[in-house]
Amino acid sequence: MHPQTRRKTSPPLRGVVRALMGDSAAASYASALADVAKATKTLDTTAADLEKVHKIFSDPQVYDFFVSPIVEPEKKYDLIDEIAKSSSLQPHTANFLNILIDMKRIDLIKEIVEDFDVVYNRLTETELAVVASVVQLESQQLAQIAKVVQRLTKAKNVRIKTVTDPSLVAGFTVRYGNDGSKLIDMSVKKQLDDIAADLEIGDIQLAV
């Protein structure tokens, strides 16, 4: 049996276990973890941990390994230990992942990360802006985008998440607001779509 984080539950995480036993919804898991992060004054670090976790579990092979009923729990615990060390995760973050394995709810990890973002943003008065572009934008460009979003929303803080979207051709889009309901579209695709609509010829196809 591996000794490190999975069997010896720290006092703050006992509250997590009680909360999770009562409700299996991803939002409840996220709120329980946020409570631990607040209690240990590690809200920002825990949010950073979960960004790393989300990236790791975005690999289909990693996700399939953890949700597989065939893989023994010990092997999953061992891999969590390796991930925690290589990614410098906090002990309570690693513990949380092991609890999800114990309770056979590791399949909810992506939804939990998303719901934790919502809780984190509310607690820290942060506006989340998702910037999509064909290639990664420079940090200076992202900083300018953050300033624009902050001016539009009057938020205390702005948190930028970046994603790649080859369909944009060039330029970028910014989604913010509740559930990403507001959009700033500075993409070439949007310009092409507008031209196509004006000409009533449907989508314009670019020659490759």
Image: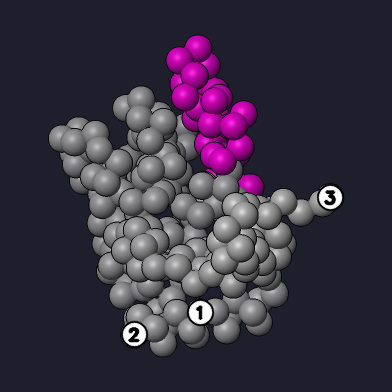
Residue at numbered disc 1? 146
Give SS at disc 3: loop
Name the kind of residue labelled 3 in the image: Val
Q: Nearer the viewer, residue 68 or 144?
A: 144
User: Answer yes or no: do the residues labelled 2 and 3 have beta carbons within 8 Å?
Assistant: no
Q: Compute the Cα span from label 3 to label 1.
A: 33 Å
Q: Earlier in the sequence, mark 2 or mark 1?
A: 1
- At which x and y percent is residue 207? 82, 51
Q: Earlier in the sequence, mark 2 or mark 3?
A: 2
Q: Nearer the viewer, residue 59 or 100?
A: 59
- At which x and y percent is residue 24? 24, 34
Q: Which residue: 39% across, 51% down?
A: 114
User: What secondary structure characterizes most of the magenta part?
Assistant: helix
Residue 64, compared with residue 180, is above or below; it is above
- At which x and y percent is residue 2? 50, 28
Name the kind of residue labelled 2 in the image: Lys
Q: Which numbered mark, 2 or 3, is in the foreground of this view?
A: 3
| Magenta range | 57-86
Q: Compute the Cα span from label 2 to label 1.
A: 11 Å
Q: Earlier in the sequence, mark 3 or mark 1?
A: 1
The answer to whether residue 56 is magenta is no
- In the image: residue 65, left or right of residue 141: left
Give SS at disc 1: helix
Name the kind of residue labelled 1 in the image: Ala
The answer to whether residue 73 is magenta is yes
Residue 145, compared with residue 178, is above or below; it is below
Q: Residues within 10 Å of mark 2 (few under 14, many from 20)?
A: few
- In the image: residue 80, left or right of residue 47: right
Residue at numbered disc 3? 208
Image quarter for residue 198? bottom right
Indicate which disc residue 154 carries.
2
Q: Which residue: 68% across, 55% down?
A: 204
